[in-house]
Image (cartoon, grey):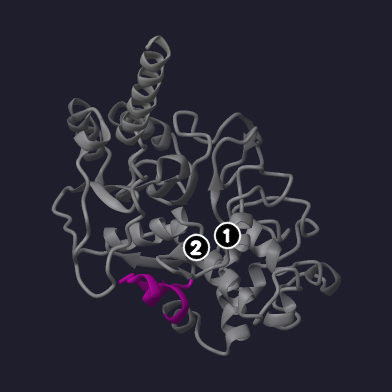
Amino acid sequence: MKYFTIFLLLLLSISSCTENDDVVQPIPSESMYFPSNTNSTWETKTLSSLGWNQNAVQPLKDFLIQKNTKSFMILVNGRIVMEEYFNGHTASDTWEWNSAGKTLVSTTTGIAQQESLLNINNRASDYLGTEWTSMPLAKENLITVRNLLTMTSGIDDTNQLVIKSNLTYLADAGTRWAYGNVFQKLTDVVAEASNKTFETYFNEKLEDKIGMDGFWDFGTIYTIYHSTTRSMARFGLLALNKGKWENEQIINETFFNESISTSQNINPSYGYLWWLNGKTSYMVPGEQTIYQGYLVPNAPAEMYSAMGAKDQRIYIIPSKKMVVIRMGGASDPSNPNFAVSGFDNALWEKINAVIN
């Protein structure tokens, strides 16, 4: 009888464990959401479902208004958690990306390479023809497409108007990092390689595939993309997913990973026209100073960003499956910086109060 009782207790124990295991099975992680290309529907997610601090939202909004923001969005797993418009700006209004649009050029260049139309390790002159600069030919021949992607062409950055007479020699390609507009020649590289205008190729291979709604302004000094805030968020979502949109790999993951990795040993916080946080040092536009520490100390170290003048921003935080968008006027009108500014650190202090 004693052994029978022990046996029954053992069976009950096993049964109890099995039932408990059924109860505590982990809930599958939330799927990544991609908005439709054919209608305006976009799934949302509440702050409370994420356990975020609702009390910190209004201080964030007050800061954004104070800093001349027109729109602000946060996506988590592709779903909208915050979408705010200020100062008369609306969801249907377009705004300039400024240099944040460099990442669109980088991505389009990568697509052209995966289609075997070009190779970024080839000389830029293979696509632009010889004497596209005013440099000695031997120096011009050192410049590769990759140098244009990494801001290491060696071309004098004193004058940002990209015309031949201004494209003069300052250093051998690959030996100097300097932020400048010569990256615009990549649009000519893609156009020559694809035998289409850059905008046509971009629309076919990137914009239309992910449902963006913007347009390019090819000015004499700047090449600038304009779009709605949600269109910028779509590209941010593509970037979060390493170039994949739903079931289609728009830009191959290998190239995208190169884009968001240190691209040269001069400015470790720069990839292929993407800005990288969490590196040991960084440089900023218009200077040759090397600053120690993270690009944005208050932001996650893993963050990579598209950054444009007047504080146009796409922040990507992979571990949180999060995309943050900011569009608007310069946070400091007296200093409409080219890309990096102290605004980023101040903004992330406010964001952290909400999400942590």
Name the residue that disc number 1 marks: 256
Disc on the earlier residue, 1 or 2: 2
Q: Disc 1 vs disc 2: Cβ atoms closer than 8 Å?
A: yes
> Residue sitting at 40 percent across and 45 percent down?
321
Viewer-proximal residue among 275 and 241? 241
Q: Amino acid at mark 2?
A: Gly
SS type, badge 2: loop
Q: Amino acid at mark 1?
A: Phe
Residue 60, x across and y down, in percent: 24, 33
Residue 130 visible (yes or no): yes
Residue furthest to the top in view is 2
Quarter of image, res 12: top left
Provide the residue span drawn in magenta.
204-220
Residue furthest to the left in view is 88
Instruction: Tell whether position 39 is magenta.
Output: no
Against 20, is 233 above or below?
Answer: below
Against 52, is 333 above or below?
Answer: below
Can you tell which mark lies on residue 243? Answer: 2
Viewer-proximal residue among 90 and 2? 2
Residue 38, x across and y down, in percent: 24, 75
